[in-house]
Amino acid sequence: MKTHISTAPVLEVTSLSKHFGELTALDKVSLTVDEGEVVAVLGRSGSGKSTLVRCIDQLEQIDAGAVYLDGELLGFEQVRGRLRPLSDKKHRLQRRRMSMVFQQFNLFPHWTVLRNITEATVVAHGLSKAAAEKRAFDLLARVELSEKAHAYPRHLSGGQQQRVAIARAVAVEPRVLFFDEPTSALDPELVGEVLQTMKDLASTGRTMMVVTHELEFAREVSNRCIFMAEGKIIEDRPSREFFENPHSEQLRTFLARSNRDANEVNA
């Protein structure tokens, strides 16, 4: 398990709620994430995992509650004693401090790997082209894809594309790095290379929140695991305790079923 680095809070989520029509996707969810923590978010499909990280990352508008990044309220500002949504410009400025790696790689197919990584750092973050390219080449070396800098996404395997997507997300030096089921779109034989890249990132002390169904990754790499069901956090505990001594029947059932499914796949 990764060593905890600091107790300074980076993220604070309070009573976060989100509805899609009559469906309650998130039901008054509260949590904190400290500096350098890796938090794994687990649960069955439809439990609210992806909606949670998308709401924190401001990709979905919340219906109630609040999200704070380094103590700053996200998505809203106080004007004459009342909260109002931020302007698009101010919202974009806030979102620059976070980054997301998606299920689908979302690389621009008509850009090279190098440009996919450098574009945001130059256009949105004001880096010079030379500085952005140096950072990109450093990151490509870290994910073992230096030789692919001038290739196009169509020339890469799914695992390679996801590693480029991770390099792109890291390039903007976010305060928090989110992953939304980053291996779910990959063929089984490609999953390991992406998980290893994520492990390497975690070892550098990055603050990460990872929605995943990879239980061994969560057990080995995360500081904490969160288990969600029906839009609520059922358990939020240190990873070792989470796996060795689940408190709720829901989590015990989830872990038993997940382990059984994994054994059947490996049989």
Image (cartoon, rainbow, N blue to C red):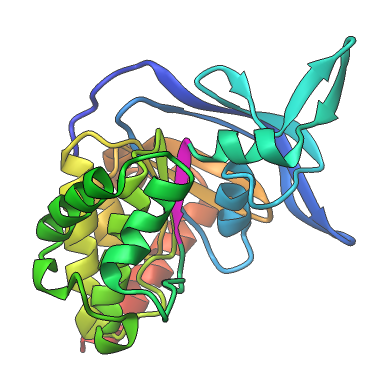
Residue sitting nearer the eye, 14 or 114: 114
Quick one: quadrant of the N terminus? top left
Rendering coords of residue 100 (x, y %): 46, 53
Magenta stretch encompasses residue 100: yes
Residue 266 lies within the magenta run: no
Residue 53 position, x and y percent, is 55, 49
Q: Is residue 215 left or right of residue 77?
A: left
Quarter of the view holding residue 30: top right
Q: State the residue at coordinates (31%, 43%).
A: 128
The majority secondary structure of the magenta stretch comes to strand
Q: Which residues are magenta?
A: 97-101
Q: Is 167 left or right of 73, judged from the image as shown?
A: left
Residue 174, image quadrant: top left
Q: Residue at x 32, y 33 (%)?
A: 37
- Residue 79 showing in the rendered view: yes
Q: Residue 222 or 256: which is nearer the viewer?
A: 222
Asked which quadrant contains residue 22, the reply is: bottom right
Q: Is residue 28 visible?
A: no
- Name the residue: 48% across, 53% down: 251
Q: Residue at x 10, y 58 (%)?
A: 141
Q: Is residue 91 above or below residue 104?
A: above
Q: Indicate whether 146 appears above or below 126.
A: below
